[in-house]
Amino acid sequence: MPFHEMFEPDGSIRPCYDEVQQWVERTGIAGLNRRLDEAEAIFRRIGITFAVYGEGGDPERLIPFDLLPRIFTAQEWRVLDRGIRQRARALNAFLHDVYHRGEIVKAGIMPADIIYRNSAYLAEMADFTPPGKVYSHIVGIDIVRTGPGSFEVLEDNCRTPSGVSYMLENREIMTRMFPELFEQGLVAPVDDYPAELLKSLKEVAPPACKGDPVVVVLTPGALNSAYYEHSFLADLMGVELVEPADLFVDEDRVWMKTTLGPKAVDVIYRRIDDEYIDPLVFRPDSLLGVPGIFNVYRSGGVTLASAPGAGIADDKAVYIYVPEMIRFYLGEKPILDNIQTWQCGKPDELAYVLEHLPELVAKEVHGSGGYGMLIGPKSTREEIAAYADRIKANPSEFIAQPTLDLSTVPTLGPAAVVGRHADFRPYCLVGKQIRLVPGGLTRVALTEGSLVVNSSQGGGVKDTWVMQD
Amino acid sequence: MLSRTAENLFWMARYMERAEATARLITMGQRMAILPGAHHRDEWRSVVRATGTGHQFPEGRIVSESDAVSYLMLDLDNPSSIRSCLLKARANGKSARTMLTQDMWESLNDGWRKLDSYDVGEARQQLPALIDWVKTRVMTFRGAAHSGQLRNEGHDFLRTGSALERAQMTLRLLDVKYYVLLPETEVVGGNRDHYQWTSVLYALSGARAYHHVYGGTYTPWQITDFLVLNRLFPRSVAYCYDQIAYRLNRLAGWHNARAACHDTARELVAAMESIDSGEIFRRGLHETVQNGLAMTNRLGFEIAEAYHFG
């Protein structure tokens, strides 16, 4: 049996869930389901949606929301908090190293190929140090739990981790609908996230910045699947939400076009991929992008968050080495473990993977969002054979991990509280200081037994509570 | 403020205003179409023309209510249909999301695809309810902006857009009345003339207000005076020009800069102050209206230029 976040193995309630259990009993499952409909109507009206392309139907879908919170005790959170910060520091140190001296390679800890032949590595970033030596300003770390004390990192997101708007909106809706749950003040608040984000971004203002840094959020536009989040964050930080066409480069600065004429921009929180930032440097065919912006960046006229090329740190092949990075750069023992991972590019590990594929989860190194993966135990013999052929054709493009006994969280079903697998993504902010609000996004697989929590594949979200002592 | 944001706010307000105006036009069309003999006079054609986009209906065939409802309410190829306007207003709002209050956004977002599910038969059957729905959407939007939006330049762009659109709609309605509704053989001041003039008042929600100002008598000069020159009626051309000039002045203040649009707005206000309804009829209502439409269009372009719209 997987670890259940709400129940002890003997069926008793874990103390941190006492309050929730009483609330469920008081309200009844039918009552909760009625409230869930109300909550979804509010989400729909507010417009908290994400766009899904090319599937027909509603182009702006709601992410299913679950009413029952996922809860961490204060003690659990202390461990997570330290582990997440540690990881964010190591990943940024690694990024600085790979774009400078490459000590980790010279020390024989990581093979050069994994870094320098990786498409996420940007040679254009070599020898350049972004303000504050920060490359990844928002580090989203996907964490799963397999037992009472065991939290493990599934994946790092160093570019533009999304979903933080759900952390805030889920809390907002829970406090609006069930104020009684928060009356005792035991749940740590998360609503200062936007203020902390703005502080972090201002701390990495470029050398050319005069006075209070002008921060903007850069979105590809209203059709982007995460547009709601982009506008939400700009709104809560009180900064402009710009599209590439609103920006231009002149005399070593980046300007935005305003009704008053051009206004200089200092820090750009960009929610747009590296290759679309600057058509002069990256993709000439890109209609997005601001011509010349990369040069301004390198000459200290503007800060891009995250830094171009930061994606090398969240590559799945690089992930394997993060515990080593922590020891190498910080001289510390890793607080959070990695999940055991086999690299198919290594002959002996490939042999093991091919032999045990029916028990493993195999992933494409560059895949994301749960696409292109094989869940061995849930696949047919034909699917496994076909996937094995793909791995054999290009081994270094694949990794494999054991199927984890992911913990289950209480989730509202039509007739009862049921257990569903979940993961957790906290958002660690890196400026001059490192900041972490007590919470994050819990994603839950709504189908019984399913391990896929991605919103693009039908996963849902729920509020995450960190209990105060 | 970003130029793109200003432009989005300006157009969002115009589209919402236009959606409401089109809904009112359909109501006016129904009112006129129940007059005896209306069918032969092709009343719906004049209604469609009032939107400034209906010229593609081929001559020689009567425009039916079904044609008009389909074209004015549902047709996505018609840029002024209610459905087009609501979708575009929402898209503008979404792009300027950070400048909208939560209530403003909700008023744009609530039921934004409602009209997708209607065919013309259902729309005609439920016409009064749909018209009410559209008007409620627009009035909720306006109310949300009125009661919650910061009075910053964004609000001024929004109000400039709605005043400009309103001025145009009132001018077009007058033109339809003068140019289309009344055949040359008909007597000015006759029964039909009277009914058509009051229909214009109804289309602008002005009938009650008109009574308060002019008592119970309807004459074309008084109605024209009311719709063009009355400074108390919020859909009159003069009121809209006052509003535009006031808003543009505020924008000039925010930016500490004036441009051609400010001069044009001042001219328009002055022109309204210097004439009376008698003079409008001496010069010709149609000419006055055409000139007004041309000037209002020009003003729109000048505003776009002054504030660097894309």
Image (cartoon, rainbow, N blue to C red):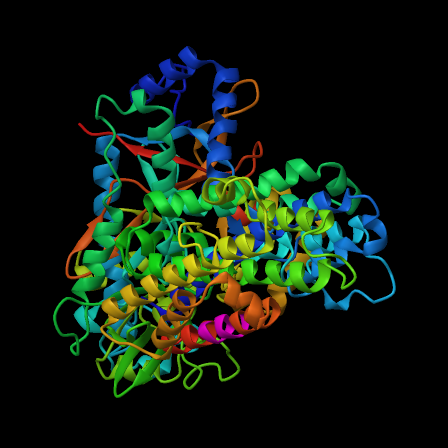
- Residue A222: x and y in percent read 48, 60
Image-based side of B126 in relation to A110, left or right: right
- Residue A156: x and y in percent read 37, 56
Nearer to the camera, B239 or A56:
B239
**Highlighted range, magenta:** B293-299
- Residue B301: x and y in percent read 47, 76
Question: In the image, what residue occupies the spot 63% across and 60% down?
Answer: B80
- Residue B94: x and y in percent read 46, 56
Question: In the image, what residue occupies the spot 66% across and 58% down?
Answer: B177
Say above or below: A465 vs B175. above
User: In this view, which residue lies farthest toward the top?
Assistant: A26
Q: Is residue A227 magenta?
A: no
Whether residue B299 appears in this view of the structure is: yes
Question: In the image, what residue occupies the spot 37% across and 61% down?
Answer: B242
Quarter of the C terminus of chain B within the rendering: bottom left
Nearer to the camera, A78 or A348:
A78
